[in-house]
Image: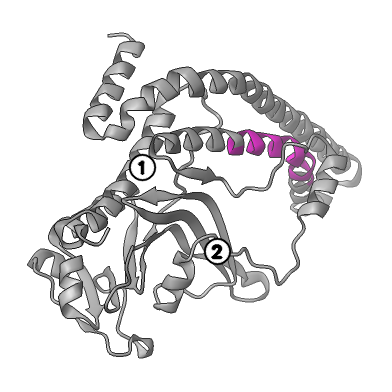
Amino acid sequence: MTIQTMLDAQFERMRSQRPEYDTAIIIWRDKLEPVLADLEVRRKATVSKAYKHTIITSLVMLAIVVGVGYFAGFGYIFPFGIFAGIVLTVLISAVVWIQVFAVKSQTKQIVVGAACQPFGFQYETLHPDMEGVKDYRSFGSWLKSNAKPLNHADEPPTPAFDGLKNAGLMPSYDKRKFEDLITGKRAEANFSLVECKLTQEQGSGKNRRTVTKFQGLLLDVEYPERFLGRTILARDGWWKRGKGAGDLQKVQLVSVELDRAFTVYSNDQVEARALLTPDRMERLIALERHFKGGKIRGVFEEGHLTIALEAKDQFEAGSVFKPLVDPRRFIETLTEIGLVCDLIDGFLTREWYKDKI
């Protein structure tokens, strides 16, 4: 079986799973594959240049360090001389590796953007544009134009962040960063999905370090109508009813297994049970399983369904150190977006809610 035959079979299987995938193979052949083929030429040249530049710089620094050690005594270069050589190598090589990062960012924009097309969604990497960085002068200009004040924090591109924070479902942090924003309409409801990373400085002096407090996906779905109550759910043992819980009371789910796996609190018991049916909870677990994540939690309040899932980098569209013309990049991203659609469909298209959309 040829690679092309295997590819056709894979796309055919996807078509049977979801009608939006009907145009996937057309998008791949007519749009995505030719664009990636052109970008592959640039990728090879950029990565090769970065490796060569780094190797040459490393050899020059090693020669300088050895020379200093030979004439001044090797005691002068351990360990500070070697450390200084490594730091200088990194700084001198930074510009060429930024160009590699720019190719990576462009690849993500192209692949994820193409995967959003069958669904009618939009995608933004939220990365700063580095296309103009070619040398140290342009790098300096780029730093000036993208410099942020010390008290600056990236503004959340989705209401999910504030909704989860207000519900006590996000940890404390010093810095926050957002990337990979997907927006659109599904089941007649607007939604936004973004990757978020929260970090915090801990310790002092030499023991000071940056700790990742949260890294994962934030999903916000605007329901056509407001919820009657407020419902919070989280993996069991992760969230405890605190001072901000107000009149929320523990909800016992229909499934004993799911009731053990999740903690649910609400001020409207009937609505909470109607929302969190076993099949909907299974969709949450499927999302968690695919993204290899954990600690999924969410809040149903006013007109928003908001979910947080801890997971490593998502929607990466594959490695920049591998050939770009690989349909698996596209298929994997299509699958990830399809899982998000499954979750939204499960909460918005069941009988309980069909008369409201």
Q: Secondary structure at mark 2?
A: loop
Q: Describe residue 110's horizontal placement relative to residue 98 as left or right.
A: left
The picture places residue 226, in percent across and down from the top left corner, at: 32, 72
Q: Which mark is residue 156?
A: 2
Residue 290 appears in the picture as rendered: no
Question: Secondary structure of the magenta portion, mostly?
Answer: helix
Most extreme residue toward the right, as rendered?
71
Q: Does residue 190 sit above or below 163 in this rendering?
A: above
The picture places residue 16, in percent across and down from the top left corner, at: 21, 29
Q: Describe residue 11's horizontal placement relative to residue 202 as left or right.
A: left
Residue 301 appears in the picture as rendered: yes
| Earlier residue among tags 1 and 2 | 2
Residue at image position (32%, 9%) is 2
Residue at image position (80%, 52%) is 145
Question: Which class describes the residues within 10 Å of circle 1: few (<14), some (14-19), or many (20+)?
Answer: some
Q: Does residue 168 sit above or below 312 in this rendering?
A: below
Residue at image position (47%, 33%) is 114
Residue at image position (28%, 90%) is 247
- Residue range in magenta is 88-105
Q: Which mark is residue 65?
A: none
Check disc 1 and give the amino acid type: Glu
Question: Which class describes the residues within 10 Å of circle 2: few (<14), some (14-19), or many (20+)?
Answer: some
Q: Nearer the viewer, residue 68 or 295?
A: 295
Q: Is residue 312 magenta?
A: no
The picture places residue 340, in percent across and down from the top left corner, at: 33, 49
Give the number of marks: 2
Q: Is residue 101 magenta?
A: yes
Q: Which mark is residue 336?
A: 1
